[in-house]
Amino acid sequence: MYAPFVSDATSAIQFIMFLSCILMGLSHILQPRMWEEYFTRLHAKGETAIITRTFTLELWPALLIVTLHQVWSGPGIVLTLYGIALTIKCTISVLAPQIGMRSLKQAQRGGNTFIFAGLMLIVVGMCAGWALSS
């Protein structure tokens, strides 16, 4: 895919997060039971599940955003704040796994939890796309 609007690290992060957040958001909305089952099984593994969730799903986008996306105005600020929040979540999860386990347990609240999370991911993705097109 040729993307002429990707000209620097900031726009690359915006493009990557636009695509990934929209895809993940739609998946959460259209397949909430799949996500519920995945995170319920992960929670059942105990505190070691924090390692899997943090290091495979959350830490890499968080670090990319925090290091390469320092946008403090316009719609891009939403992506920057998301990256900071995700970095804080990752830090708390690995340093205090009992707290991280609480967020994994949220899966047991049912599919609506994932639908809401999906909507939030789509908002982040749309803000990234809006910032990219600005």
Image (cartoon, rainbow, N blue to C red):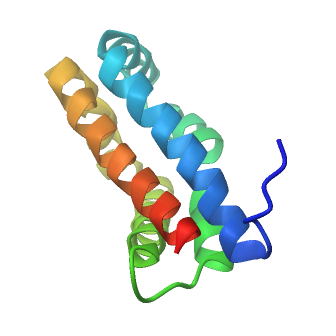
How many numbered discs?
Answer: 0
Residue shown at 50% from the left, 55% from the top: 94
Whether residue 19 is visible here, answered yes or no, is: yes
Which residue occupies the extreme right position in the image? 2
Query: Residue 120 or 85: which is nearer the viewer?
Result: 120
Give the residue drawn at x 33%, y 34%. 104
Q: Where the N terminus falls, by quadrant?
A: top right
The picture quadrant where one finds residue 132 is: bottom right
Asked if residue 71 is positioned above or below residue 89 in the image, the reply reads below
Q: Nearer the viewer, residue 55 or 22?
A: 22
User: For this rendering, which residue is in front, 48 or 117?
Assistant: 117
Question: Which residue is at 27% across, 40% downward?
Answer: 119
- Residue at (27, 25) in percent of width and height: 107
Left or right side of 7 for 131: left
Q: Position of residue 36 (x, y in %)?
A: 32, 17
Q: In which quarter of the view is residue 86 placed?
A: bottom left
* 25 vs 37: above or below: below
The reply, left or right, for residue 110 in relation to residue 89 is: left
**Residue 123 screen position, x and y as percent:** 33, 52
Q: Nearer the viewer, residue 133 or 46?
A: 133
> Vertical placement of 104 versus 58: above or below?
above
Left or right position of 96 against 55: left
**Residue 31 x %, y %:** 37, 14
